[in-house]
Amino acid sequence: MPIVVSAVLFCVASSTRATPARDDSVAKLFDLMRVEQTYNQMVSQWDAMVEASAKQAAAAQGAELSTEQRLLVRKTETELKAAVPWVAIREINLQVYRESFTEEEIQQLIAFYESPTGQMFLEKMPGVSAKTMALSQQRIQSAMQKLEKELQAEREHFN
């Protein structure tokens, strides 16, 4: 009897073993999900953040960005892009998806993103993400201002 139970368990375990996700399937999913476009948008946001940060630092000193500082900003943006090119990020994503999803799950995701609902989701997500980010930043700024006032009050109390 134990041999029969062991054989049944082995058969069940063997039949439920999932096929690993294939690179071509994951690449198709990435195309449908517009992963490269999302990456490119993120890189553009990095550029804007680097420039805004440099301008903010200059403004804090009562100045505008000099020509040298503008060149340094451009160099920083270029080096940041070179440090994390899409090709490298794509390979990392492929690896993570292969390790995280089965081929069947990838096919289900592909079917979803090919559907009208999946396409609607993809169309709306950039706006949803942007709004979420803006509202989160407002909350964080408000909290930071409050914290800064509290810290200033504590410094004054101890001085």
Image: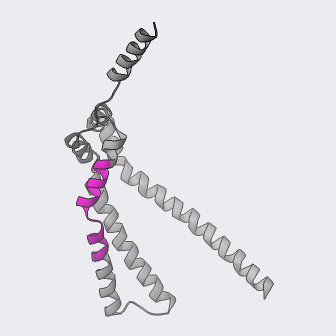
In the picture shown, does residue 149 fall above or below 44? below
Query: Going 47% across and 88% down the picture, which residue do you hit?
Result: 59
Residue sticking out furthest to the top? 1
Query: Going 26% across and 60% down the picture, which residue do you hit?
Result: 88
Residue 153 spot, x, y in % from top left: 75, 80
Which SS does the magenta portion mostly show?
A: helix
Colour mapping used in the image: one colour
Q: Relative to the observer, which residue lies in front, 122 or 109?
A: 109
Residue sticking out furthest to the left? 24
Q: Is residue 109 magenta?
A: no
Residue 8 spot, x, y in % from top left: 39, 13
Q: Quadrant of the N terminus?
A: top left
Q: Relative to the observer, which residue lies in front, 51 or 120?
A: 51
Q: How many marks?
A: 0
Query: Going 29% across and 46% down the picture, which residue do you hit?
Result: 33
Q: Quadrant of the C terminus?
A: bottom right
Residue 23 spot, x, y in % from top left: 22, 43
Query: Going 61% across and 71% down the picture, which residue do you hit?
Result: 144
Residue 105 spot, x, y in % from top left: 33, 33
In the picture shown, does residue 130 fall above or below 60? above
Residue 41 lies in what quarter of the image? bottom left
In the picture shown, does residue 47 fall above or below 24? below
Residue 26 lies in what quarter of the image? top left
Q: Is residue 45 left or right of residue 103?
A: right
Q: Relative to the observer, which residue lies in front, 17 or 62?
A: 17
Q: Is residue 84 magenta?
A: yes
In the image, the segment drawn in magenta is: 79-95
